[in-house]
Amino acid sequence: MATTVQVDFSEVQEFFATLERAASDGFRNELETFLDGIGFEFLRIIQDEIVRLQVMDSRQLLASFTKDAEGNIWRMEEGGLVLEVGSSTSYAGYVNDGHWTNPRGVAKRFVPGFWEGHRFIYDPSASTGMILKQHWVEGKHYFDSALRILDRMFPTLLEAKLQQWLNRYFQ
């Protein structure tokens, strides 16, 4: 006894045609634009964390973060997608990670400058200043905190964007 099974592949063919149309309509460009937006959102989160963690003298640090900048580069790589964020200040990594006040083996050093209230102003030409004793300055970890926040946000943002694309092509 012979049994015949007929399968209708028209819906599968229509699905693949829709996928090809979506790809040719600039899906990759839209994805790159979306990821670029994620990069700028990450920069905003970093700046928010610098303010929230009350980093001293944060104006220059806040203004220093840019996408794909030279200098202090943090690189995130996930599933073939790469985001590089950098700061144009030389001290951004020290503020985030922590640092020693003096070079290795130096117990004390003189730093030229003057005091304005409770704030020390570095001035290399000053005849006054202060002595820095060697000790560890704990980092603020603003970058690490911003990364944790983005890690929590990203799946929701990506899901919403993918749903938007699916709705455009498959409804």
Image: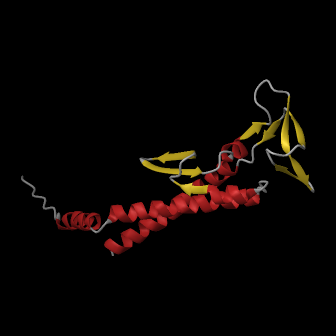
Please provide percent x and percent y for residue 45: 63, 60
Q: Is residue 116 left or right of residue 147?
A: right
Judge by depth and name the residue closer to the eye, 158 or 144.
Answer: 144
* Residue visible at 81% across and 48% down in the picture: 122
Q: Is residue 47 left or right of residue 125?
A: left
Q: Is residue 170 visible?
A: no
* Residue visible at 56% across and 46% down in the picture: 73
Q: Residue furthest left?
A: 1
Judge by depth and name the residue closer to the eye, 123 or 62.
Answer: 123
* Residue visible at 48% across and 67% down in the picture: 160
The quarter of the picture where residue 98 lies is: top right
Vertical arrangement, residue 43 with respect to residue 128, above or below: below
Q: Residue furthest right?
A: 117
Please provide percent x and percent y for residue 113: 85, 47
Give the quarter of the figure containing the C terminus. Answer: bottom left
Please provide percent x and percent y for residue 103: 76, 30
